[in-house]
């Protein structure tokens, strides 16, 4: 018998090792996944192609992975933000604004710019993925368009690009610097940068001024929380899962059981009054609401006599002057309604469940104060 069990566990362990090995091999062959709009991403949604172009053409182009508070407040720097996460931290937004006010420029590409740098937007319907844009010089371009959002420019904003539905890009002066906002981050992606005139439009926006350096902002992409698969290697996750399964099998083999602790009836029946529970169940199933309510009221009258010496023979409505200085759970108006209405309720031949619950609660509140006070 012992040998049979031992062989079974050896077989399970071998199968477990094989499964872990196969899982690790398969997971190692899985292609790496990149979040969209990253400058290091070669996937169709990344912007590595555009970043590589900047590295070759502009020697000072580089990635920026740090908080905006560390940005040097030198003049003529360009910070390029491509579909950044919505900035809700006011301190972070203040750092970006101080960078611009010092004489620098932020060029932001985002499908929905609402809430970013106090930009207001509107929605329009797109008939096709290709639109005709016009710049501030009157030149027309064909461009890919995947955003229904259009920018609502302010009075002092310079409109750089627009189509039939509204404004695509604006330039706004902030302090000594500028903010350039564009609604189409897809123009920079590996998949769409060479479509239509997308690259020409982007380069035209970059030529608005001459920059001493170009920074590709990656800080706002890092602000999103990482999943467990991004933090730990896949082989470690697979091994951990197998270890959990092996532990469960071992616990079951050892006879462990999971669930609530069940106390034998003879251990607690002595310390409870089952007659009260049975009586309550009988009243509930028989819908004897009138009898139950009368019993509660009678008991309240007995407690009033024992605790406060109030005569059992007095009518309910005659108890107001005696109870007013002693009762705190009810104000004068509630107490008056209680004393004048309870007698008529107790004399009813039929009491509904709703009435029963209402008056039972009122009587119980008063009883507790009398017993505790």
Image (cartoon, grey):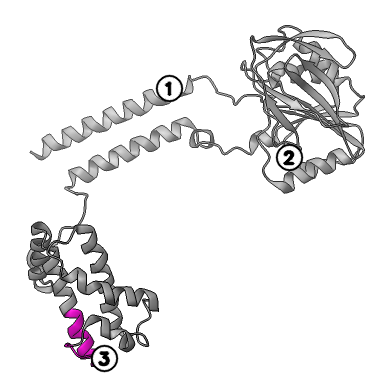
Q: Main secondary structure of the magenta part?
A: helix
Does 311 lie within the magenta span? yes
39 to the left or right of 292: right
Q: Position of residue 254 (x, y in %)?
A: 18, 47
Front one among 134 and 349 = 349
Q: In what element is the residue under mark 3?
A: helix
Residue 276 percent across, percent down from the top left? 11, 70
Mark carried by residue 66: 2
Disc number at residue 70? none
Instruction: Residue 270: tell me if it is visible.
Output: yes
Report the label total: 3
Q: CA distance from mark 2 to mark 3?
A: 74 Å
Q: Within the image, what quadrant is residue 93 found in? A: top right
Residue that mark 1 sits on? 25
Mark 1 and mark 2 lie on one chain; the one further toward the N terminus is 1
Distance from the alpha carbon under mark 1 to that under mark 3: 82 Å
Say few, some or many: other residues with alpha carbon within 10 Å of mark 3 (under 14 / 14 to 19 / 20 or more).
some
On the rendered structure, is 149 left or right of 342? right
> From what the image shows, is residue 51 above or below residue 323?
above
Which of disc 3 and disc 1 is earlier in sequence? Answer: 1
* Side (left or right) of 160 relative to 276: right
Residue shown at the point (49%, 33%) measured from the top left: 229
Dividing the picture into quarters, in which one does residue 100 lie? top right
In the rendered image, residue 238, in percent from the top left (x then y), is placed at 40, 32
10 Å crowding of disc 2: few (<14), some (14-19), many (20+) = few
The residues colored magenta run 299-313
Q: Nearer the viewer, mark 2 or mark 3?
A: 3
Q: How far from the left and from the top, in percent, is residue 130? A: 68, 8
């Amino acid at each position: 018998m012992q040998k049979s069990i031992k062989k079974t566990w050896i077989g399970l362990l071998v199968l477990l090792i094989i499964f872990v090995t196969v899982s690790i091999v398969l997971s190692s062959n899985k292609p790496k996944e990149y979040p969209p709009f990253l400058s290091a991403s070669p996937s169709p949604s990344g912007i590595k192609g555009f970043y590589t172009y900047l590295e070759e053409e502009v020697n000072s182009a580089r990635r920026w992975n740090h908080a905006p508070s560390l940005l040097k407040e030198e003049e003529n720097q360009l910070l390029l933000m491509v579909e950044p996460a919505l900035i809700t931290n006011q301190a972070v937004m203040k750092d970006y604004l101080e960078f611009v006010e010092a004489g620098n420029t932020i060029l932001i590409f985002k499908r929905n710019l609402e809430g970013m740098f106090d930009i207001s937007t509107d929605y329009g319907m797109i008939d096709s993925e290709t639109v005709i844009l016009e710049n501030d010089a009157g030149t027309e371009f064909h461009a890919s368009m995947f955003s229904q959002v259009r920018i609502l420019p302010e009075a002092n904003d310079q409109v750089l690009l627009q189509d039939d539905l509204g404004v695509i890009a604006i330039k706004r002066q902030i302090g000594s610097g500028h903010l350039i906002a564009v609604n189409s981050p897809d123009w920079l992606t590996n998949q769409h940068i060479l479509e239509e005139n997308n690259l020409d439009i982007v380069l035209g926006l970059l030529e608005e001024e001459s920059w001493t350096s170009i920074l590709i902002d990656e800080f706002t992409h890092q602000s999103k929380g990482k999943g467990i698969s991004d933090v730990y290697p896949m082989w470690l996750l697979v091994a951990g899962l197998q270890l959990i399964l092996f532990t469960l099998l071992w616990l079951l083999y050892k006879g462990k059981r999971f669930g609530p602790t069940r106390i034998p009836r003879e251990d607690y029946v002595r310390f409870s009054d089952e007659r009260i529970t049975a009586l309550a169940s009988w009243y509930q199933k028989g819908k004897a609401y009138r009898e139950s309510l009368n019993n509660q009221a009678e008991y309240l009258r007995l407690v009033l006599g024992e605790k406060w010496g109030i005569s059992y023979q007095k009518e309910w409505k005659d108890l107001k002057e005696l109870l007013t200085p002693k009762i705190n759970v009810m104000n004068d108006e509630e107490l008056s309604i209680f004393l004048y209405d309870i007698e008529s309720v107790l004399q009813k031949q039929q009491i509904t469940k709703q009435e029963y619950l209402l008056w039972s609660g009122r009587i119980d509140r008063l009883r507790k104060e009398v017993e505790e006070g």
